[in-house]
Image (spheres, rainbow, N blue to C red):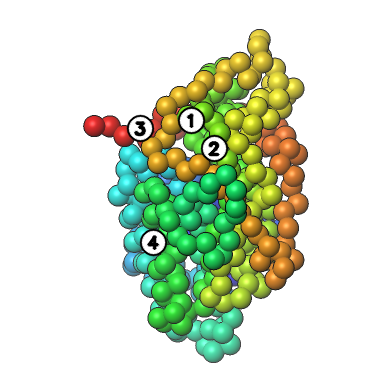
Amino acid sequence: MKILITGGAGFIGSAVVRRAIADGHEVVNVDVLTYSANLENVASVADAPGYAFEQADICDAAAMREVFTRHQPDAVMHLAAESHNDRAIEGPIDFVRTNVMGTAVLLEAARAHWNALPDAKKAAFRFHHVSTDEVFGALGEDGDFTEETPYDPNSPYSSSKAAADHLVRAWGRTYGMPVVLTNCSNNYGPFQFPEKLIPTVITRALEGKSIPVYGDGRQVRDWLHVDDHADALLLVLGKGRLGETYCIGGDGTKRNIELIHMLCEHLDRMAPANTAHADKIEFVKDRPGHDFRYSIDASKLRAELGWAPKMQLMAGLEDTVRWYVDNRDWIEGIRQRGFQSERLGLVKA
């Protein structure tokens, strides 16, 4: 299968690219290469047979038509998105442009391509939209998100992803496009840009800086290793029922402060400092509109397609810390491009 993967130089997208190539698929990686994208993330497969890279913006209709015409993909996996909540608070229009308008432009390019395919290829074509559990809003002290949970996004980021979800479903119902959607919990693992929680803790600890914790740190997240997520996404692309949504969770629910202490324990072993890394924890002002708890019930995916996460959280965190400790040159490359772990997302008057 030839898969067009948008955002394939990003964190989750690059994991999908690497897995797809390993599984014997052809891949067309389409990425505009914004600040968080990095071709080093796919360097291990850059010379693989069947791999192609296109630097292009999903909001550019002409460029998308050209990519589809040139490569003639059998399926699309749409992962390109602005994704950091703090940046969405400071610059929401960028999120609307990429996540909403970009999705609409991509859908139209895919629809034109799909309509022109011969019958057999048209019947086999798939458009897989990759989304987030944040579209469902926040949970209280108990319960889980399922595919039936009503949408209730609370941030500019989650609202833009919710809008994209609705557009994909609309293209499926209005035009008959063969679509499938997934909503995942928080991802972690190697190659994650150091603005998200886990790489922020690790990279700041390695640099001897304070470790910021938003609010009281009691927010709860379900953590999914990116390699498990990539496996699930490719499984849904190939075998998921058309028009359906599948929730993907990692069975790794922890409060943020608990997770940070777990990371600090690993760091104390792998990169010891003069004091325990947990001594560097600093509680800071919470993010506006910070959802309290996310938790995924992935039983539909388990029952229909037999998927379950393989990576347990403690082992996954150890693996992730080790990767960042062993790949400080990757971190340094990002620093040289201007990223300094500055705090974003505080609403200014």
- At label 4, the amino acid type is Ala
Q: Is residue 209 above or below residue 125?
A: above
What secondary structure is marked by label 1? Answer: strand
What secondary structure is marked by label 3? Answer: loop
Q: Quadrant of the C terminus?
A: top left
**Where, by quadrant of the figure, is residue 162 drawn?**
bottom left
- At label 1, the amino acid type is Tyr
Q: Residues within 10 Å of mark 2 (few under 14, many from 20)?
A: some
- At label 2, the amino acid type is Gln
- The residue that appears at 59% across and 22% down in the rendered structure is 205
Residue bearing mark 1: 214
Q: Which mark is residue 346?
A: 3
Q: Residues within 10 Å of mark 3 (few under 14, many from 20)?
A: some
Q: CA distance from mark 2 to mark 3?
A: 18 Å
> Of the residues tagged 2 and 3, which is closer to the observer?
2
Q: Which mark is residue 163?
A: 4
Residue bearing mark 2: 219
- At label 3, the amino acid type is Leu
Q: CA distance from mark 2 to mark 4?
A: 25 Å
Q: Quadrant of the N terminus?
A: bottom right
| Whole-percent x, y for residue 45 in the image | 64, 53
Q: CA distance from mark 1 to mark 2?
A: 9 Å
Residue lying furthest front: 141
Number of marks present in the image shown: 4
Horizontally, is 168 left or right of 11 in the view?
A: left
Q: Earlier in the sequence, mark 2 or mark 4?
A: 4
Q: Earlier in the sequence, mark 2 or mark 3?
A: 2
Q: Is residue 61 above or below residue 134?
A: below
Residues tagged 1 and 2 counted as in contact (Cβ below 8 A)? yes
